[in-house]
């Protein structure tokens, strides 16, 4: 039943967040580019990425490695789908949840459809492509409109066999980890 799955998500989130707190940082500077190349995005193409916070995998270096592409970062817009703006290293401002957000013009929630690849933050991903996020539902509400490849970015140990899933969970097309590189899903 769905409410059981929700409880199991809560338990899994707590476990994964605790593990992250004691895990080494995962700057993953090359893995974003590896994912974009794996899906054959041409220079100048659009990629959605994210500004990593706290113990999340990812870094400014991961974004800067994508300088041949047009990189969009999410902007939290109330409880709705995420808005987007172009990443420029010198045009960032503080957003909610300790995030930095791009300060340039907002492109609207439909901008996610312009991306050939969407790099998606996650606490964990499973072999079927089910992703567990932080529980806000922002990405699930957003990715329904995406048309490009959805690639979750996690540590090796966060790529797991099976996660609890609800009907609204949007499946990932691939995962990238430092040890395994880009893995197409479902496995
Ligand atoms: N880097 C990044 N950007 C993102 C997300 C994300 O998960 N990671 N989001 C995904 O939906 C959206 C924002 N939603 C978020 C929801 C919760 C937390 C969060 O819990 N962060 C800290 C607590 C920070 C604080 O409140 O001070 C944490 O993980 O403990 C972060 C972002 C859009 N941008
Ligand atoms: N497409 C959607 N439409 C409306 N509500 C949604 C949708 N997707 C998720 N939600 C709601 O958002 C809440 C959190 O969902 P879920 O547990 O899947 O978040 P998550 O994927 O871990 O978080 P995030 O996407 O922010 O990283 C749930 O209450 C869920 O019902």
Image (spheres, rainbow, N blue to C red):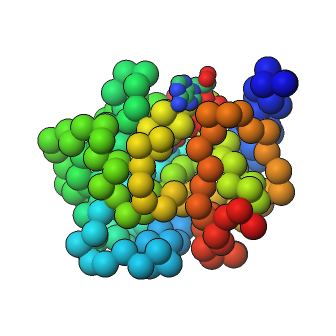
Task: Count every numbered label the image shows and give the total.
Answer: 0
From this view, report whether residue 81 is shown above or below residue 18. above
Nearer the observer, 155 or 108: 108
The answer to whether 24 appears left or right of 115 in the picture is right
Residue at the image point whose x is 53% and y is 37% from the top: 140
The x, y position of residue 47, in whole percent, is 35, 61
Q: Quadrant of residue 81?
A: top left
Q: Quadrant of residue 164?
A: top right
- For this orientation, the residue located farthest to the left is 105
The x, y position of residue 128, in whole percent, is 74, 56
The N terminus - image quarter: top right
Nearer the observer, 177 or 116: 116
**Do we see residue 33 in this rendering?**
no
From this view, report whether residue 117 is shown above or below residue 123. below
From this view, report whether residue 122 is shown above or below residue 119. above
**Do we see residue 16 in this rendering?**
yes
The x, y position of residue 92, in whole percent, is 25, 46
The answer to whether 121 appears left or right of 169 in the picture is left
The C terminus - image quarter: bottom right
Residue at the image point whose x is 51% and y is 52% from the top: 120
Residue at the image point whose x is 30% and y is 63% from the top: 46
Residue at the image point whose x is 54% and y is 50% from the top: 121
The x, y position of residue 66, in whole percent, is 34, 70
């Amino acid at each position: 039943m769905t409410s059981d799955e929700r409880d199991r998500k809560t338990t899994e989130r707590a476990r994964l967040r605790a593990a992250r707190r004691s895990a080494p940082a995962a700057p993953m500077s090359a893995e974003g580019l590896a994912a974009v190349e794996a899906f054959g995005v041409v220079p100048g193409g659009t990629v959605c990425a994210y500004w990593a916070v706290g113990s999340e995998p990812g870094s400014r270096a991961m974004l800067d490695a994508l300088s041949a592409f047009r990189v969009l970062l999410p902007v939290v817009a109330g409880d709705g789908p995420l808005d987007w703006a172009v990443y420029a290293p010198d045009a960032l401002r503080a957003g909610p949840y300790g995030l930095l957000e791009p300060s340039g013009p907002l492109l609207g929630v439909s901008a996610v459809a312009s991306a050939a690849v969407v790099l998606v933050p996650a606490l964990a991903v499973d072999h079927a492509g089910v992703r567990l996020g932080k529980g806000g539902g922002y990405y699930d509400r957003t990715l329904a409109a995406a048309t490009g490849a959805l690639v979750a970015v996690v540590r090796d140990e966060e790529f797991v066999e099976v996660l609890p899933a609800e009907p609204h969970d949007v499946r990932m097309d691939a995962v990238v980890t430092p040890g395994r590189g880009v893995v197409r899903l479902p496995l």
